[in-house]
Amino acid sequence: MTYDEAFKKVKEMFNKVKTEGFKEFFAIQVNLTDEDCSGIFYIEYKDSKLSVEPYDYIDRTTSVTAERAELMKIFSGKANVVKAIEKAKIEVNGDAESLIQLADAIKATGKKPSAKKVVKKDKPKTEDKKTSDKKTKPKKKVEPSKKVEPSEKVEQVNLYIAEAQPKVKKTKKTK
């Protein structure tokens, strides 16, 4: 993925973010370190508006340096900011709280509201409907599974892996 593609993707993510929970100004400069996707952009919250632009931000409150994949995991909610900092997957200089707040806002934006369950009322059956002539198969009786010891599980997994690997035919080299 190129820097331009990554930047567009990040900008789209932030267009949907609700800023009601933000309390004060912040400017986060993001430094992408990938060989094929290196570059700088900033995320600024000012006057109740969130901006994402592809520029160096001199008076930033926070600087984040990371690889694109790790940053995308954080912004998509698949990775935790604090854990990423602790494991040195990202480097944060300045106010880390603004980055945490931003990541939480993105997660909240991505959540779908829970659907209400619809309870269907039983309708009285009418004889006008055609009945199907399909025969139903009797349900198979499910037997409880036997308890498997951990060592047996490992052997089963190894056997499964060995069976799943393609068999390679040895060929003779010709001169």
Image (tube, helix red, strand yellow):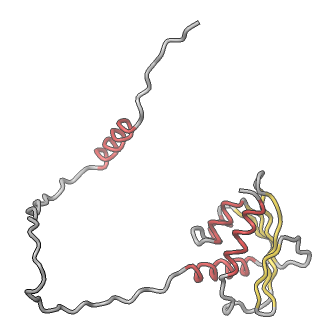
In the picture provided, is 146 more to the left or to the right than 166? left
Q: Quadrant of the N terminus?
A: bottom right
Q: Residue at x 55, y 9 (%)?
A: 174
Which quarter of the picture shows residue 127?
A: bottom left
Which quarter of the picture shows residue 156?
A: top left
Which quarter of the picture shows residue 168?
A: top left
The answer to whether any part of residue 94 appears in the image is no
Q: Is residue 79 above or below residue 108?
A: above
Q: Residue at x 37, y 36 (%)?
A: 162
Camera-side residue of 133 and 173: 133
- Residue 108 position, x and y percent, is 58, 83
In the picture provided, is 62 more to the left or to the right than 58? left
- Residue 46 position, x and y percent, is 81, 89
Residue occupying the far top of the picture? 175
Residue occupying the far right of the picture? 58
Q: How many marks?
A: 0
In the picture provided, is 38 more to the left or to the right than 140? right
- Residue 73 position, x and y percent, is 62, 66
- Residue 7 position, x and y percent, is 75, 67
Camera-side residue of 174 and 92: 174
Q: Quadrant of the C terminus?
A: top right
Camera-side residue of 148 and 104: 104
The answer to whether any part of residue 162 appears in the image is yes
Q: Is residue 141 above or below residue 63?
A: above
Camera-side residue of 147 and 162: 162
Q: Is residue 85 above or below residue 33?
A: below
In the picture provided, is 31 more to the left or to the right than 82? right
